């Protein structure tokens, strides 16, 4: 069976809350029991608690497969890039180095590369990947384009990424603010790495306490805003 072509995988990094539910659900996938094929990365740990889930983007021309000397990595007809075939994988690590998204993992104890295969045992029959079924904030979403347009009216899905001179098109879409896509139809990853986050001010409404009230009655008496 093949993944229905009207169902797509969407990632909305702005909605990730770092709960790690996706990591736990991924370990229950029938194709790699006990191992999580999802990375949960911190965007800038020294300055922010913002996290982002990293799954295989399933490139239309997967670099990992192109650099594999043993032809162990296969892409199915519906665009899902599979983990390395055990009989062919020589655990050279070429795919780990070549992937622009940092997805493949080399398990040296088993001498094989394993990665997210979009829960192919589920998606090939129209079911959601395990991670998308448990994500409480819908940072990971599996459904139709119409559904995501309705859920995210201020964002638009992008599946074309620019790495220097290389343009990569993927099966997985990343949700970005709609106003950003008016200037470019792709996401320039390398230039975005140098961008600094915009400063944001937090305004808190302070509740006044009567002068006659004892200091211990104000729970925020020693808090500076």
Image (tube, rainbow, N blue to C red):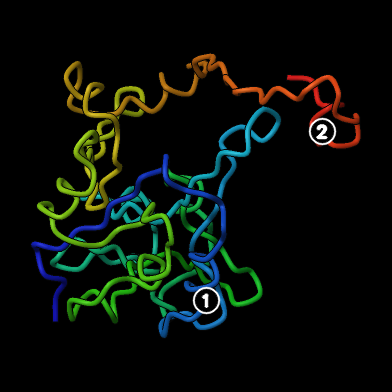
Instruction: Give the CA separation, mark 1 to mark 2.
Output: 47 Å
| 66 up-or-down from 22: above or below | above
Which is nearer the eye, 47 or 66? Answer: 47
Reply above or below: 78 against 146: below
User: How many other residues sit within 10 Å of disc 1, few (<14), some (14-19) or many (≥20)?
Assistant: some
| Left or right: 23, with 46 as reference point | left
Residue found 19% across the figure and 58% down from its top: 8
Query: Which SS class for mark 1?
Result: loop
**Residue 63, disc:** none
Q: Tell me the quarter of the image containing the C terminus.
A: top right
Extreme residue in the front direction: 212
Residue 153 lies, in percent from the top left, at 19, 38
- Where 19 sits versus 130, above or below? above
What's the residue at 85%, 37% (across, down)? Answer: 217
Element assignment for label 2: loop
Give the residue at x 25% y 46%. 173
Relative to residue 118, is residue 24 drawn left or right?
A: right
Q: Which mark is residue 27?
A: 1
Front position in the image: 162 or 144: 144
Say which quadrant the N terminus sits in: bottom left
Instruction: Indicate the position of residue 14 as horizontal and vertical percent values.
Output: 42, 39
Q: Quadrant of residue 31?
A: bottom left
Question: Sequence order check: which comes first, mark 1 or mark 2?
Answer: 1
Q: In the drawing, what numbered circle is on residue 218?
A: 2
| Labels 1 & 2 near each other (Cβ < 8 A) | no
Residue 139 is situated, as x and y percent measured from the top left of the image, at 39, 52
Nearest the camera: 135 or 74?
Answer: 135
């Amino acid at each position: 069976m093949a993944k229905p072509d009207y169902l797509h995988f969407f990632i909305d990094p702005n909605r990730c809350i770092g709960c790690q539910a996706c990591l736990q659900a991924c370990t229950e996938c029938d194709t790699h029991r006990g191992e999580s094929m999802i990375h949960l990365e911190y965007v800038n740990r020294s300055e922010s608690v913002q996290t982002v889930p990293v799954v295989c983007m399933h490139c239309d021309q997967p670099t990992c497969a192109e650099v594999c000397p043993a032809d162990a990595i296969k892409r199915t007809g519906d665009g899902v890039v599979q983990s390395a075939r055990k009989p062919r994988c020589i655990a050279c690590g070429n795919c780990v180095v070549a992937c622009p998204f940092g997805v493949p993992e080399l398990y040296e104890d088993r001498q094989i590369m394993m990665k997210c295969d979009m829960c192919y045992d589920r998606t090939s029959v129209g079911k959601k990947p395990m991670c998308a079924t448990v994500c409480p904030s819908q940072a990971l979403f599996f459904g139709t384009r119409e559904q995501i347009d309705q859920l995210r009216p201020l964002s638009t899905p992008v599946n074309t990424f620019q790495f220097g001179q290389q343009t990569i098109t993927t099966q997985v879409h990343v949700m970005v603010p709609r106003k950003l896509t008016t200037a470019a139809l792709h996401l320039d990853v390398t230039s975005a790495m140098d961008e600094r986050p915009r400063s944001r001010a937090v305004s808190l409404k302070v509740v006044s306490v009567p002068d006659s009230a004892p200091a211990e009655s104000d729970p925020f008496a020693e808090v500076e805003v």
